[in-house]
Image: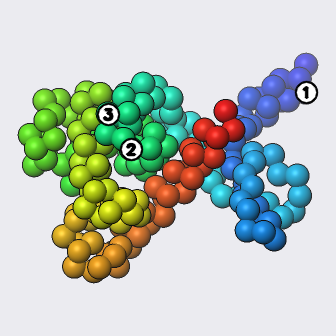
């Protein structure tokens, strides 16, 4: 009886996480999986345990992301990647600098983006997507520059004639682009 209880306790404490692995073949083609089939695969995204940033439902706001994507002509995958990087799908997120909601809208931009309630998922996504559209147009469709400008401001991107040499911004662009390609790849599989 004691052995069965020990096994139940042990099994109950083991958590299974869905890490994503990547392998780049000799032709430069990236392959992603959650179940590596060879030693060539390396961890690409390490899933965080429940209670961390990944604990929010990642599909809960897809209908609003889709609406914003269609309205502004922006990739669904890009918007979703930005939301994941900005707030990890937490509609009540507030940053240390005061940015609010899913797309982390700064208080001084609430009116400009026509947002009444920054914690309303639809309003926040539409406002953030509208701003991203302006940035994409300003930077002639160059996604990485628009993403950098979303984080550091368009003036910083202009001053540095590219992604600013700010660690937070460089890490942010890298994170958004990683999620963007993963969501894009997942959408093409479906």
Q: Is residue 29 left or right of residue 76?
A: right
Circles 1 and 2: CB atoms closer than 8 Å: no
Tag 1 secondary structure = helix
Q: Residue at x 83, y 64 (%)?
A: 40
Compared with residue 167, is residue 72 higher up or lower down, i.e. above or below? above
Residue position marked by numbered label 3 in the rendering: 71
Residue position marked by numbered label 1 in the rendering: 3
Tag 2 secondary structure = loop
Q: Residue at x 10, y 49 (%)?
A: 108
Q: Residue at x 42, y 24 (%)?
A: 63
Spatial separation of the CA atoms under disc 1 and disc 2: 56 Å
**Image quadrant for the C terminus?**
top right
Quadrant position of residue 14: top right
**Image quadrant for the N terminus?**
top right
In this orientation, which residue lies closer to the viewer: 118 or 24? 24
User: Mark 2 packing: few (<14 Cα in 10 Å), some, or many (20+)?
Assistant: some
Query: Earlier along the polypeptide chain: callout 3 or callout 1?
Result: 1
Residue position marked by numbered label 2 in the rendering: 74
Circles 3 and 1: CB atoms closer than 8 Å: no
Q: Is residue 118 left or right of residue 121?
A: left
Give x and y (percent) for residue 132.
Answer: 29, 50
Give x and y (percent) for residue 100.
Answer: 24, 42
Q: Is residue 14 visible?
A: yes
């Amino acid at each position: 009886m004691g052995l069965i209880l020990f096994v139940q306790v042990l099994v109950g404490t083991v958590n299974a996480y869905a890490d994503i692995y990547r392998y780049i073949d000799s032709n430069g083609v990236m392959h992603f999986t959650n179940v590596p089939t060879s030693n060539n695969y390396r961890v690409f995204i390490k899933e965080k345990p429940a209670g961390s940033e990944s604990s929010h439902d990642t599909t809960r706001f897809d209908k609003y992301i889709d609406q914003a994507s269609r309205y502004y002509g922006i990739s669904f995958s890009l918007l979703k990647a930005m939301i994941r990087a900005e707030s990890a799908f937490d509609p009540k997120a507030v940053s240390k600098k005061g940015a609010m909601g899913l797309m982390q809208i700064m208080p001084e931009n609430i009116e400009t983006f026509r947002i009444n309630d920054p914690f309303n998922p639809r309003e926040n996504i539409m406002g953030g997507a509208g701003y991203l559209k302006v940035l994409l147009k300003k930077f002639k469709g160059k996604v990485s520059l628009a993403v950098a400008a979303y984080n550091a401001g368009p003036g910083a991107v202009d001053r540095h004639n590219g992604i600013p040499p700010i660690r937070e911004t460089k890490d942010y662009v890298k994170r958004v682009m990683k999620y963007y390609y993963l969501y894009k790849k997942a959408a093409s599989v479906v």
